[in-house]
C-alpha cells in the first residue's frame, strides 16, 4: 500500500493541480518549496506555478480563482498551508512564501487583528464535573439511532416569538465544521483553527482550549470511561473520567479530559496519507466505534499518484486507552490490478468506500449500520455507495444494500483525461449522511438513508436491509443533492435538499417531509429567496446542513445564512434569524456569519446553538439563543 504522494518533475501540471485543489477545500498540503526573490517572494508567480492549473479551469468541486479571491481571507489560506492533511510536506515553504501567496490570492495581507484569540474571555470559575443527562446533545445524532430528534428541547413552538440572541462566539479561522456538543452547562465545539473549546452555555466564556494541531471537522462525543490509575497503572485500580473524543484531518482521534482540557491519548486510525476523520464516533457497551474516510479521490487526480490504496473502515477501540480492538474495512473484495496507466503505475482496486458519517446502532440486533462513499477505480465492489450492517462485537459483515454499483469517481476527470480516471466516470453519489433507525408510531422499524443522488431510501432492518421504498426528491450532484442528513419523528422524515452550484455560489433548496412507511411526500417548503447579509453575490438558498427535529418544531439552516424553524404539520416557517452578518462576540472579536453548512442545530434546556460559516460561504460564528435571551 502506497502512503506517499509521488511527485516527478517531468509532469508538473497534475501535481500543481492536486496541491491547489487540496488548498481550495481547506485540506491542503503546504506547497512545494520555492526560491524567494531577493525582494521577497512573488505571490503571483507562486499562484501561477502552484494553483492556477486547477483554479483557473475549475470543475467538479474545485472552486474557481474568483471564488477563492472573494470568499477566502489570507488567514484561511495560511491555515490550509500549515494545518492540512499533508502538513509534513509543508516544511519546504517559508512563512514569507505562504504570506505572499495568500496576499496575492485574496488581495489583502493577513492581520493578527482579523483573528480571534483562542485564549480570550476565560471563565473565572473552573468547569463543573460533567454528568451526562437525558436530553443532552452528545455527539452527532442525539441518540444511538441518529434520529436527530430532541424529546426534551426546553422550548415549544409557542416560545419561538420570544427566542432572542443570548451570545455569539467567534472562532479563530473563518470556517465552521461539525456541530456543538452540549452536555449539562458545557459546550464542546471547534472551528477551522484546529482548536477544541469548552464553553460555558450560560455566558459563552471559555473554560479551556485544546490545540489539536490539525483541522477538526467531526463533532465531539463525551463519555464516561474507566482507565488505570495514574499512580499504580494497575487494571485493578481504575479511575473514572469523562472524556471527549474528536477526529482530525490527519486521521487522528483525540481523547481529551472534559474537566481540564488535557490530552489523555491520541491515535492515528489509518496510516494512509489521505486518511481523515469526518464522522463522529459512537460509544456503545463500552466500545468506541470511529469511522474513517479519505481524500484519495483528490490525490488520484495526479496521474503520477499510484491509484488507489485506501479503503474506508470502522475502528473499534477501548475508549479509555485508545487500544484498537478490531478494524474492519468497508470493502471486502480482494485486491485486483488493472493495466498500467501512461506513467507506468498499475491501478489497484477496489478502493474507496469512505465512511463520512457517524455509525448507527441497532441495540436489538447488536448491529452497526454504516453508510459508505463512492469507489475510486473501475474494479467492481458491492460496498461503495452502500449501507453496510456489521456485527457490533466483531465487525463481521451481516448484509449490504448498494444504491449505486457503478460510481467510480476521481477529481478532475470530468471533461479532461487524467491518467487515473475511471473509463466510465461515475456521478460521485456518496452516502455522506448517517443512516437513521426509527420505529414509526404505527408500523415496523425502518432504516432511512439519504444520498447525494437526491434520493431517500427506506430499508427493512428486520429483513437484511431489503428495499421498501425509494424516493427521489431533488436532482443529485457531486456537491450533494442531500448532503449532511435529515431528522425523524414517529411518522415523518424531514430532509434538507440542495441545488447548490459551486461556481456561482447560488442554487435553491427545500425542506421536504416524507412518510416513513411509504416515502410519500407529505409537504415540501422551498427555501425563501431571502437576501443574504453579506450582499447579493454568492447568495444561495440550499439546505446542506443537517436537520434537527422536536415534537412541534423542525430546525433547518440554509446557505443564505438564515436559521429557520418550520411546523412539522405543514412546513410553515415559524421563525427565522439572519446569521450572515457581523456581530460583537463575547471573546472580544468580530464574529461573522456565513452559509449554514455541515452540522445541524443543537437544542438543550431551552438553549439553541447554531453554527454559521462554510467553505462555500465563509463565517466563524457560534450563536446561542434562548427565550428572551435569558
Image: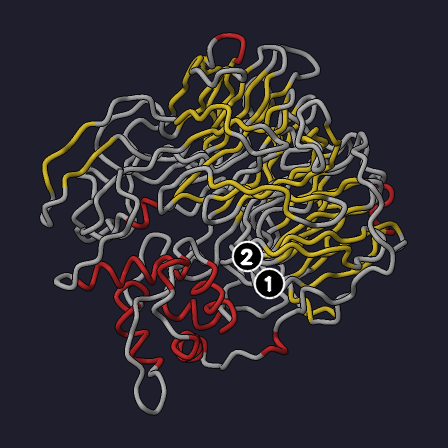
Residue 619 badge: 1
For disc 1, the neighbor class at 10 Å (few under 14, some 14 to 19, many from 20) is: many
Q: Is residue 16 above or below residue 460?
A: below
Q: Which mark is residue 614?
A: 2
- Residue at 57% x, 64% y: name it: 174
Residue 622 appears left or right of 42: right
| Image side of residue 48 versus residue 470, left or right | left
**Compared with residue 614, is residue 499 higher up or lower down, i.e. above or below?**
above
Image point 67% across, 50% down: which residue?
Answer: 189
How far, Cα to Cα, is label 1 from label 2? Answer: 6 Å
Location of residue 567 in the rendering, given as x and y in whole percent from the top left corner = 73, 38
**Residue 106 falls in which quadrant of the image?**
bottom left
- Could you say which disc has been placed on residue 205 in the image? none
Say if mark 1 contacts mark 2, CB within 8 Å. yes
Residue neighbourhood size for the residue with mark 2, other residues' Cα within 10 Å, grouped as few (<14), some (14–19), many (≥20)? many
Front-lying residue, 82 or 470: 82
Left or right, residue 377 beside residue 593? left
If you read the primary sequence from the N terminus, does the residue marked by circle 1 or circle 2 appear first?
A: 2
Amino acid at each position: 500500500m502506497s502512503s506517499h504522494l509521488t511527485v516527478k518533475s517531468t509532469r508538473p501540471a497534475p501535481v500543481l493541480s492536486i496541491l491547489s485543489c487540496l488548498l481550495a477545500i481547506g485540506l491542503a498540503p503546504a506547497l512545494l518549496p520555492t526560491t524567494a526573490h531577493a525582494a521577497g517572494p512573488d505571490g503571483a508567480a507562486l499562484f501561477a506555478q502552484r494553483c492556477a492549473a486547477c483554479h483557473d479551469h475549475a470543475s467538479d468541486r474545485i472552486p474557481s480563482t474568483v471564488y477563492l479571491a472573494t470568499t477566502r481571507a489570507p488567514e484561511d489560506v495560511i491555515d490550509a498551508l500549515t494545518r492540512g492533511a499533508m502538513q509534513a510536506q509543508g516544511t519546504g515553504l517559508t512563512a514569507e512564501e505562504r504570506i505572499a501567496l495568500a496576499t496575492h490570492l485574496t488581495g489583502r495581507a493577513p492581520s493578527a487583528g482579523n483573528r480571534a484569540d483562542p485564549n480570550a474571555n476565560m471563565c473565572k470559575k473552573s468547569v463543573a464535573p460533567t454528568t451526562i443527562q437525558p436530553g443532552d446533545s452528545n455527539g452527532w445524532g442525539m441518540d444511538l439511532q441518529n434520529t436527530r430528534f430532541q424529546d426534551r428541547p426546553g422550548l415549544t413552538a409557542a416560545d419561538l416569538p420570544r427566542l432572542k440572541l443570548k451570545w455569539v462566539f467567534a472562532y479563530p479561522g473563518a470556517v465552521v465544521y461539525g456541530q456543538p456538543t452540549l452536555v449539562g452547562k458545557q459546550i464542546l465545539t471547534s472551528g477551522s483553527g484546529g482548536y477544541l473549546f469548552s464553553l460555558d452555555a450560560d455566558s459563552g466564556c471559555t473554560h479551556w482550549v485544546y490545540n489539536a494541531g490539525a483541522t477538526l471537522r467531526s463533532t465531539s462525543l463525551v463519555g464516561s470511561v474507566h482507565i488505570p490509575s495514574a499512580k499504580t497503572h494497575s487494571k485493578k485500580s481504575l479511575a473514572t473520567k469523562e472524556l471527549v473524543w474528536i477526529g482530525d484531518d490527519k486521521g487522528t482521534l483525540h481523547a481529551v479530559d472534559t474537566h481540564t482540557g488535557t490530552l489523555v491519548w491520541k491515535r492515528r486510525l489509518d496510516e494512509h496519507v489521505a486518511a481523515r476523520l469526518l464522522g463522529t464516533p459512537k460509544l456503545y457497551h463500552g466500545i468506541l466505534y470511529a469511522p474513517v474516510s479519505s481524500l484519495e479521490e483528490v490525490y488520484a487526480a495526479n496521474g503520477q499518484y499510484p491509484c488507489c490504496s485506501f479503503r474506508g473502515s470502522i475502528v473499534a477501540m477501548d475508549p479509555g486507552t485508545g487500544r484498537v480492538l478490531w478494524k474492519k474495512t468497508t470493502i471486502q473484495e480482494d485486491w485486483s490490478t488493472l493495466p498500467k496507466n501512461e506513467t507506468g503505475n498499475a491501478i489497484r482496486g477496489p478502493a474507496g468506500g469512505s465512511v463520512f458519517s457517524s455509525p448507527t446502532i441497532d441495540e436489538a440486533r447488536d448491529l452497526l449500520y454504516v453508510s459508505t462513499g463512492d469507489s475510486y477505480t473501475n474494479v467492481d465492489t458491492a460496498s461503495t455507495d452502500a449501507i453496510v450492517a456489521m456485527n457490533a462485537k466483531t465487525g463481521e459483515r451481516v448484509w449490504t444494500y448498494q444504491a449505486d454499483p457503478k460510481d467510480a469517481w476521481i477529481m478532475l476527470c470530468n471533461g479532461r483525461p487524467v491518467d487515473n480516471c475511471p473509463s466510465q466516470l461515475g456521478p460521485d453519489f456518496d452516502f455522506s449522511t448517517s443512516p437513521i433507525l426509527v420505529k414509526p408510531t404505527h408500523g415496523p422499524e425502518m432504516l432511512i438513508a439519504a444520498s447525494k443522488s437526491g434520493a431517500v431510501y427506506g430499508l427493512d432492518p428486520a429483513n437484511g436491509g431489503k428495499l421498501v421504498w425509494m424516493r427521489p426528491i431533488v436532482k443529485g450532484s457531486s456537491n450533494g443533492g442531500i448532503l449532511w442528513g435529515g431528522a425523524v419523528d414517529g411518522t415523518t422524515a424531514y430532509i434538507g435538499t440542495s441545488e447548490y452550484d459551486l461556481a456561482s455560489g447560488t442554487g435553491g433548496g427545500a425542506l421536504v417531509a416524507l412518510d416513513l412507511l411509504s416515502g410519500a411526500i407529505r409537504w415540501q417548503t422551498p427555501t425563501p429567496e431571502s437576501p443574504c447579509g453579506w450582499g447579493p453575490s454568492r447568495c444561495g438558498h440550499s439546505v446542506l446542513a443537517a436537520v434537527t427535529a422536536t415534537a412541534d418544531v423542525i430546525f433547518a439552516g440554509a446557505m443564505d445564512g438564515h436559521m429557520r424553524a418550520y411546523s412539522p404539520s405543514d412546513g410553515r416557517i415559524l421563525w427565522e434569524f439572519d446569521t450572515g452578518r457581523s456581530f460583537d462576540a463575547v471573546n472580544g472579536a468580530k464574529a461573522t456569519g456565513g452559509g449554514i453548512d455541515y452540522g445541524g442545530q443543537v437544542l438543550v434546556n431551552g438553549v439553541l446553538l447554531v453554527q454559521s460559516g462554510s467553505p462555500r460561504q465563509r463565517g466563524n460564528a457560534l450563536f446561542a439563543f434562548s427565550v428572551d435571551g435569558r
